Image (cartoon, rainbow, N blue to C red):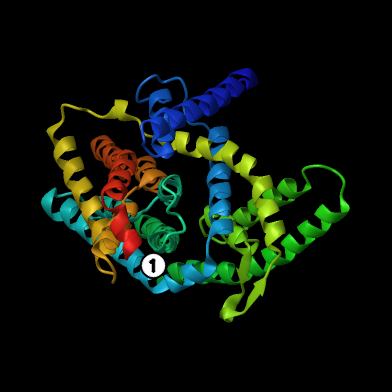
Amino acid sequence: MDTPSFLLQIALILVTARLAAELAAWARMPRVFGELAAGVVLGPSLLGWIEVNAVIQVLAEIGIILLLFEVGLETDVGRLLRAGGRSTLVAVTGFVVPFVLGFYLSRDFFGLSLLVSLFIAGTLTATSIGITVRILTDLGRQNSPEGQVVLGAAVLDDILGVILLAVLFDFSASGQVDPGKAGKVVMLVLGFFLLAPLAARALSTLIRYFHEISDAPGVVPVLLVSLVLAFAGLAHAIGAPQLLGGFAAGLAVSRRFFLPFAVSLRVDTAFGEHMHEQMRPVIQLFTPIFFVMVGLSIDLSLVDWGSAFIWTFSLSVAAVAILGKLVSGLLIPGSRYTRVVIGMAMVPRGEIGLIFAEIGRASGIFEADVHAALVLVIAYTTLLAPFWIKLYYRWYGHHMEEC
């Protein structure tokens, strides 16, 4: 694509995303729904004006990485640690139940092959941390008790998804599973989370030093963006999701930083606020590109709307996908209202589900009808979840505040 056309596309994405987000807010819907809908409208599903390309993907990746950096900045680490047990239970249950139900449905009910059934089941395990966090942020619940449980569970879900993807790749290539490769991924991710925040904390001290001695504007955002992207690249290099690098960097430079083994250091609250204010415009510029790209990636024009199989299969799989995540919230202790909304917040598949579906299609594992049905499932969970969650908070939010 020539440069002028690409620049016009980026301008169209930014303006349309902003207008759609404002329209969604006016209609009392989460802003993220407007941004997702903007992608569906601009993409191959409707107008077909914009197709996802490598540059848009890179800008979208930067957007989700910066969003997770902001989430890390605003996270109450103490509360996140206290929610660790519940987050782990939600993540593991929300991973295992959809996988088992999805595999059984695909293999025994629809008679699909072993490898296809495994990839379908793997697609259902994902939770889109970016979409989930944005929904809770739009509702002002990202730092609530249920928000911290969901955040921790979504992070663990991403790690489990990476491990599962490595295992399925190995199985599709060799017909067997190598536990050593999965164990290596686990150890690398754990090592990253232990060591990366320490390095980020040290580098944030340097950022403050340069901020104090430099008269040039923009020192803080330039150095912080460089830090975040470097940690995202490091996370990817060791086999972890890139967005976890941004999250780890955000935790490390937040107002209160916790070292491993429960040792804590207080940081300068005023400078932490200054960093956040400096980064907010950059984050708000890039993150809409990510959500628009998710909408662009959903090509509803490929769906054979007259196919009985697509409707039967997609609705059955969607029911399993939603039920599996709802169960994950119901198993933890606490108010039933809080448990239900935790399960609901884990439902959106978004970009993670699309990655699984696209890998299955590109590698020849999924036939066209199976891939189209999975795209529909991802569309159901991604586009409708903001409605469910907002309505639930409107009707039952006061019960959660009392509990």
Q: Quadrant of residue 268?
A: bottom right
Nearest to the observer: residue 106 or residue 324: 324
Numbered-mark total: 1
Q: Quadrant of residue 401?
A: bottom left
Q: Is residue 149 left or right of residue 245?
A: left
- Residue 386 in percent (x, y) is at 34, 42
| Residue 176 seen in the current view | no
* Label 1: which secondary element: helix
How dense is the environment of label 1, judged by Cα within 10 Å: few (below 14), some, or many (20 and up)? Answer: many
- Residue 275 in percent (x, y) is at 69, 52
Q: In percent of the image, x 27 and y 53: which residue is there? A: 396
Q: Quadrant of residue 90?
A: bottom left
Q: In percent of the image, x 35 and y 30: which residue is there? A: 299
The amino acid sitting under disc 1 is Ser
Depicted 395 relative to depicted 87: above or below: above
Nearest to the observer: residue 198 or residue 264: 264
Nearest to the observer: residue 79 or residue 402: 402
Depicted 174 relative to depicted 41: above or below: below
Which residue position holds label 1? 87
Q: In percent of the image, x 21 and y 55: which residue is there? A: 323
Q: In percent of the image, x 28 and y 44: which residue is there? A: 391
| Residue 267 seen in the current view | yes
Depicted 10 relative to depicted 393: above or below: above
- Residue 31 in percent (x, y) is at 43, 37
Q: Quadrant of the N terminus?
A: top right
- Residue 303 in percent (x, y) is at 26, 29
Q: Quadrant of the C terminus?
A: bottom left
